[in-house]
Image (spheres, rainbow, N blue to C red):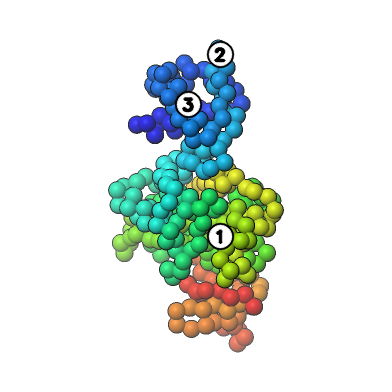
């Protein structure tokens, strides 16, 4: 109940912008007493929000905290369902594990698990993902799309487009996508996406999309073995980025693309994805579980499968692989 009241309070401040809101108005909007409103205001102050209170005018938010919180993310969030239900924790083993638990408890679509630190973060093929505290975005998103299980990998590509659009919007940088799940800046990885499926043969129960995004790390925040292959928005731009604002932008772009996808299918997403793809037209090596295919990347099919043309002119369809750019 308290979290619902807090959501309504932050929604009211979001809609008000720089306008003052009276205690009475807030009480009516969120459905509680003026005393309860005051208590919520004090809780926000403890979290680091700077609020101005003027007699006969009311309250307005002047500044949000540097530290990321669920409330700070909600302030300014304009989505219909993505990110409306946030489970925030300081430190977790993995946001994916918590998301799986919430899925089993029937968490609604759009629920997000966000942490300041992951102790056992992982990427594809159970590779370790370095997730230092207070620097990046480590989160998992729960989806329940009414699509065949075979189409689930398309949501990895959709997520990549949404993140690239958000990075462009927030930083002015121009990221590129390396199929299937890496986002690069100047050839170095800044984002990984891990999509996990819970389904029966013909029906999806849920898809959990894990996102690891390097935002404000400095070079020394990475282990030495990652210096040549990993980067962050800060390293590439020289400027700090508000992680909460970036998360809101990701949610906004993702929701628009997701609604478009459910309505019109993968084709519009495919066109956007190919516009950001770094590998199309280049010779690459695709390392699958069974062999290595070298060839020119032609693009992706309408299902999201990578197409490679080898030296003999044969076209290979690659469903899952590690990609090495030549």
Residue at left offset 57%, top offset 57%:
214
Mark 3 = which residue? 41
Measured as percent of width and height from the top left, residue 190 is found at 59, 60
Please tell me whether mark 2 or mark 1 is closer to you in this view.
2
The quarter of the picture where the N terminus appears is: top left
Residue 233 percent across, percent down from the top left: 63, 55
Q: Quadrant of residue 178?
A: bottom right
Residue 280: x and y, percent?
63, 70
**Location of residue 279 by image quarter:** bottom right
First in sequence: mark 2 vs mark 1: 2
Q: Residue at x 61, y 67 (%)?
A: 227
Is the residue marked by circle 3 packed among few (<14), some (14-19), or many (20+) residues within 10 Å? Answer: many
258 relative to 323, above or below:
above
**Mark 2 or 3 closer to N-term?**
3
The residue lying at 56 percent from left, 13 percent from top is 55
Residue corresponding to mark 1: 191
Residue at mark 2 to residue at mark 1: CA–CA distance: 47 Å
Sequence-wise, which precedes: disc 1 or disc 3?
3
Q: Nearer the viewer, residue 23 or 148?
A: 23
Q: Quadrant of the C terminus?
A: bottom right
The residue closer to the viewer here, 270 or 69, is 69
Mark nearest the camera among 1 and 3 is 3
Q: CA distance from mark 1 to mark 3?
A: 35 Å
On screen, 33 above or below 261?
above
Instruction: Say which element carries label 2.
Output: loop
- Determine the residue positioned at 56% across, 47% down: 243
Tell me, yes or no, if residue 82 can be seen here.
yes
Residue wearing tag 2? 55
283 sits left or right of 136 in the view: right
Q: Secondary structure at mark 1?
A: strand
Can residue 154 be spotted in the picture? no
Q: Label 2, label 3: how many angstroms apart (C-alpha)?
A: 15 Å
């Amino acid at each position: 109940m308290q979290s619902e009241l807090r959501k309504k309070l932050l929604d009211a401040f979001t809609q008000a912008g720089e306008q003052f809101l009276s205690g009475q108005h807030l009480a009516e909007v969120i459905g509680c007493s003026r005393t309860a409103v005051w208590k919520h205001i004090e809780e926000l102050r403890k979290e680091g929000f700077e609020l101005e209170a003027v007699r006969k005018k009311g309250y307005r938010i002047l500044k949000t905290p540097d530290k990321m919180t669920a409330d700070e993310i909600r302030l300014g969030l304009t989505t219909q369902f993505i990110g409306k239900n946030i489970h925030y924790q300081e430190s977790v083993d993995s946001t994916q594990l918590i998301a799986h638990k919430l899925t089993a408890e029937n968490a609604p679509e759009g629920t997000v698990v966000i942490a300041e630190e992951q102790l056992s973060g992982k990427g594809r093929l159970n590779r370790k993902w370095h997730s230092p505290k207070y620097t990046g975005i480590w989160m998992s998103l729960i989806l329940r799309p009414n699509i065949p299980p075979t189409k689930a990998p398309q949501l990895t590509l959709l997520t990549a487009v949404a993140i690239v659009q958000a990075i462009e919007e927030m930083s002015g940088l121009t990221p590129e996508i390396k199929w299937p799940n890496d986002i690069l800046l100047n050839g170095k990885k800044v984002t990984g996406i891990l999509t996990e499926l819970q389904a029966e043969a013909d029906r999806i129960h849920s898809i959990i999309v894990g996102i690891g995004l390097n935002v404000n790390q400095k070079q020394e925040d990475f282990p030495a073995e990652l210096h040549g292959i990993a980067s962050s928005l800060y390293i590439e731009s020289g400027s700090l980025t508000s992680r909460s604002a970036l998360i809101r932008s990701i949610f906004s772009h993702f929701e628009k693309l997701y609604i478009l996808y459910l309505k019109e299918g993968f084709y519009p997403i495919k066109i956007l994805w190919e516009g950001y793809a770094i590998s199309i037209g280049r010779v690459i090596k695709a390392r699958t579980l069974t062999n290595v295919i070298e060839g020119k990347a032609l693009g992706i099919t309408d299902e999201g499968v990578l197409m490679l043309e080898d030296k003999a002119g044969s076209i290979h369809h690659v469903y899952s692989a590690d990609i090495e750019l030549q």
